[in-house]
Image: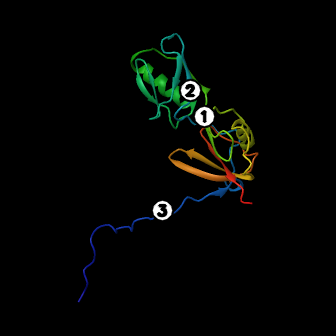
């Protein structure tokens, strides 16, 4: 007697996600300063459209990842570079409103970074280009008396993924990073 053969695609077992894995900064590399800046929520952008003063102004990337520009409506900014966004705005304007639009987009203010844990003034602060973890701690009011000064945890959003790494004090930060200062155990 022959047993029946199942018909249809195989059914995959459900995937159980475990706890987040924290890796050392030397394994992931880290920002070198040569990566293109990827736009995200809370970035303030300066958009200049030549010959169109009503369109040329500061725009803030909203929670959904868009900017709202008069005449053309919302334009997706999250996940794009300033060059990509320049081309998207020019294309939308050029379709109906402006003949051969000359558009420039640059970052007027980066999104903030966050510092938590054993610092005197945890919270959200404006990002400064070239900042390291130790400089972020100084901005956060310095260490508390219980702070560990050996390693720190950085949480960084990379597109749809969130990466957590342990890094030394001289590790460079990116806009939107969250730095956690550990408590020492002695």
Sort mark 1 into few (<14), some (14-19) or many (20+) by Cα contacts within 10 Å: some
Report which residue position mark 2 lands on: 44
In the rendered image, the residue lying farthest to the left is 1
> Residue at left 59%, top 59%?
21
Label 2 – label 3 distance at C-alpha: 36 Å
Q: Nearer the viewer, residue 7 or 153?
A: 153
Residue 10, position as x, y percentages in the image: 34, 69
Q: Secondary structure under badge 3?
A: loop
The mark nearer the N terminus, 1 or 3, is 3
Q: Nearer the viewer, residue 131 or 180?
A: 180
Q: Secondary structure under badge 2?
A: strand
Q: Left or right? Give the position of 95 relative to 41.
A: left
Q: Nearer the viewer, residue 150 or 61?
A: 150
Q: Nearer the viewer, mark 2 or mark 1?
A: 1
Report which residue position mark 3 lands on: 17
Q: Secondary structure under badge 1?
A: loop
Report which residue position mark 1 lands on: 112
> Residue at left 53%, top 26%?
86
Q: Left or right? Give the position of 19 relative to 93.
A: right
Q: Quadrant of residue 184?
A: bottom right
Residue 141, position as x, y percentages in the image: 71, 37
Q: Left or right? Give the position of 12 relative to 17.
A: left
Residue 106, position as x, y percentages in the image: 60, 25
**In the displayed structure, would residue 51 be above or below residue 31?**
above
Sort mark 2 into few (<14), some (14-19) or many (20+) by Cα contacts within 10 Å: many
Give the position of the N terminus as an image quadrant.
bottom left
Residue 175, position as x, y percentages in the image: 62, 37
Q: Nearer the viewer, residue 80 or 111?
A: 111
The mark nearer the N terminus, 2 or 1, is 2
Label 1 – label 3 distance at C-alpha: 30 Å
Q: Quadrant of residue 170?
A: top right
Sort mark 3 into few (<14), some (14-19) or many (20+) by Cα contacts within 10 Å: few
């Amino acid at each position: 007697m022959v047993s029946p053969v199942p018909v249809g695609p195989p059914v995959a077992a459900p995937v159980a996600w475990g706890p987040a894995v924290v890796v050392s900064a030397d394994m992931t590399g880290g920002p070198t300063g040569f990566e293109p800046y990827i736009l995200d929520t809370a970035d303030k952008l300066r958009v200049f459209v030549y010959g169109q003063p009503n369109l040329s102004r500061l725009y803030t990337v909203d929670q959904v990842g868009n900017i709202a520009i008069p005449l053309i409506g919302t334009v997706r900014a999250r996940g794009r570079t300033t060059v990509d966004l320049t081309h998207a705005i020019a294309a939308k304007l050029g379709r109906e409103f402006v003949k051969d639009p000359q558009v420039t987009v640059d970052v007027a203010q980066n999104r903030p970074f966050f510092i938590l844990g054993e610092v005197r003034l945890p919270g959200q602060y404006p990002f400064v280009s070239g900042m390291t973890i130790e400089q972020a701690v100084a901005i956060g009011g310095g260490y508390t008396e219980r702070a560990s000064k050996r390693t720190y945890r950085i949480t960084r959003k990379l597109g749809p993924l969130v990466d957590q790494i342990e890094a030394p004090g001289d590790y460079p930060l990116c806009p939107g990073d969250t730095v956690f200062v550990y408590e020492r155990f002695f």
